[in-house]
Amino acid sequence: MIRRVLQVLAGVLVLIAILLGGAFYLSRPDVPPLVPNVNDKPVGTFAVETVTMHTFYDDEVRVDEGRIVVPENRTSEASNHIELFFRVMRTEAADPRPPVFFFAGGPGSSSTRVAQTTYFYLFREIQEFADVVLLDQRGTGGSNPNLQCYNQLGLPTDITVDVPAQAVSAVAEAVGKCADRFRREGVDLAAYNSAESAHDIEALRKALGYETISLFGYSYGTTLAQFYIRLYPDRVARSVMAGPVATDEALKLPARVNGKFEAMDSLLAADPLAVQYMPSLLELMNKVHAALRAKPQFIQLPLMDAVSDEDGVLGKAVFQTISLVKPHWELTLTDQHLQMMMATRGGNPTWTRKLPSFYYAMHRGDFQEAGNFLRNFRRETLPNLLFFTASCATRYSEARWAEASATSSYALTHTGISFGRFPEVCDAVGVPKLPGLSDPVTGETPLLLIASTLDTQTPVANMRVVASRFPDPVTVIVENASHTDLIFPETGETLLQFLQGELVESSVQHKDGRRALRFRRPISFDPLVPYRYSLQDTLFAVTQRHGVEAAVARYEVIRRENALQDEYLWDLGENSLNALGYRFLRAGMTEEAIRIFELNTAVFPKAYNPFNSLGEAYLLAGRVGEARRALNRALELNRYDGNSYKLLNQMEANK
């Protein structure tokens, strides 16, 4: 009887969870309403109005916002009509340079949304001499239709054999459901490819009345820029490609991707502290993967650990309900699971810094973080369907497939880095292969290329391929950057000079007959093991007993005595002091926080973040003038620091 009651109760709880889950998905703000076509509007319909664009950092700027109607499929007379969304940041320059069209990555990202992030400050600098045109590529952002998928990846996490095949099958099933949703609404998925998007750019150029344009592509956006150069070479003044991908090389090669791990191995080998624990990152990675191949790791995690504020009230209710019946996630981590997870995070600088400690923990038998990572990876939502339609419309040679499928020397295989192009996945998408999409692009366009040494998404080798096809490109290699942090003050300044035709030749090194620049970003990896002593706890306790000046004196002693640590004793980096300052702020100890932030700016005078934090603390204390000076100093050190702009904007709004 008791068992029967429990079974009924479990059924009721699961039903409630399903109902709540449905409400959760219907309420999600990132699931846009589907507008499959605008057939009531003639092709060429063009409307623009001046509106205020708001950034995520409280900036407000007047822009021209508009829509243009184009054919969905230019090869079909019976094509639907679709609508492209764009914004133009107009310049007031008396003698403007050619307008700069920005193309976001993915494929599937929104250019107008990117313009609301820290890229806004770069675009605002470009706006001083040229219009900035932000086009949401067909299928993305504010364009209609938006092809955002809303179903989860659903990677199987309870298997130990033939993981790549089952993972590809799971992706194919999820992608197929998303594709069927749009196909039922009459969307012609075969029309969502790079060639059609390039023609869209030309339609917008004509509508805006520009004679020639400059191109600025990021990641996949560089591929789109190359298609436009091929189709409309006479319309391109200049082109910037950050994280470039050649049109015929989107199928990634493990040998190139692994260059990141080789570079990291060299950096860690030069660290006298890390090398004591990890003589070779590559060897340790291979040991971890070999151990998982021999024996997959079973992991059990509390269900509620996966819940965060991002899940919202309904999401939390779903998990809370399910946890009453099934309180734990049960996962199996295999070598292939780990490869796929590492591939998807390869361009993220946070994961780059974390990767050595992540592997070192698994080497020591601690799989807690790996389990959390796998659980969250399984729950990820599929990207915009354009990611798959654009990829699957492209043919790849048998030789390229063979090279891409070769056994990797280190951690990544083809399954992890190119699953979106597998035949099984493309069969589920159901778009035809189109001729010409994989042809290499050559041209005479003045070209600036930017790549980084720790990027698995678009390795430096990709840049060299594109560079070889243009007569006199300028190449920029950023040491220690990943994929998402290519644009920072130094590369931004180079980009601005290039777009104006004023690149300072004295700053360019000539190597092998080519113009090249090299920048170095500082990097510090997460500690391989926890620090033995807590700087935060120590200085917080000293402050409570003897005051903040005693804590400052204690810090100076610790820093002096541990300048050359041969063990992980104290975290003496800028983030450690910054975290202490915020601990004081949370405790309502504003003056103590200010003193710690002042100390941090003195110890790290070239780091922008301590000045940003100091400005925030000054502002909380009502010391407006000092806050403004600190924030302006942060912007002198990093003029793309959105958080400092946000605080300054708030100060202006409260005048």
Image (cartoon, rainbow, N blue to C red):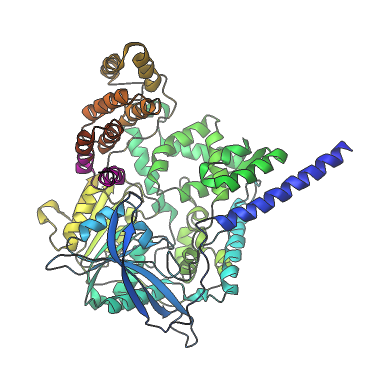
> Residue at left 30%, top 51%?
486
Q: Is residue 516 left or right of residue 30?
A: left
Question: In the image shown, does 189 or 146 lie closer to the viewer?
Answer: 146
Q: Which quarter shows the N terminus?
A: top right
Residue 279 highlighted magenta (yes or no): no
Q: Is residue 505 left or right of residue 289?
A: left
Residue 509 in sight from this viewpoint: yes
Q: Residue furthest left?
A: 506
Relative to 11, residue 270 above or below: above
Question: In the image shown, does 158 or 258 lie closer to the viewer?
Answer: 158
Relative to 85, residue 573 above or below: above
Q: Is residue 335 left or right of residue 235?
A: right
Residue 291: percent from left, percent from top: 57, 37
Q: Which quarter shows the C terminus?
A: top left
> Residue at left 28%, top 51%?
487
Residue 538: percent from left, percent from top: 38, 17
Residue 298 in sight from this viewpoint: no
Residue 650 highlighted magenta (yes or no): yes
Q: Residue furthest front?
A: 655
Question: In the image shown, does 299 or 533 lie closer to the viewer?
Answer: 533
> Residue at left 72%, top 40%?
325
Q: Determine the main secondary structure of the stretch shown in magenta.
A: helix
Relative to 222, residue 535 above or below: above
Residue interval drawn in magenta: 632-654
Residue 264: percent from left, percent from top: 36, 40
Relative to 366, residue 409 above or below: below
Residue 284: percent from left, percent from top: 46, 35
> Residue at left 58%, top 44%?
375
Question: In the image shown, does 88 or 292 lie closer to the viewer?
Answer: 88
Q: Residue furthest right?
A: 1
* Residue 177 falls in image quadrant: bottom right
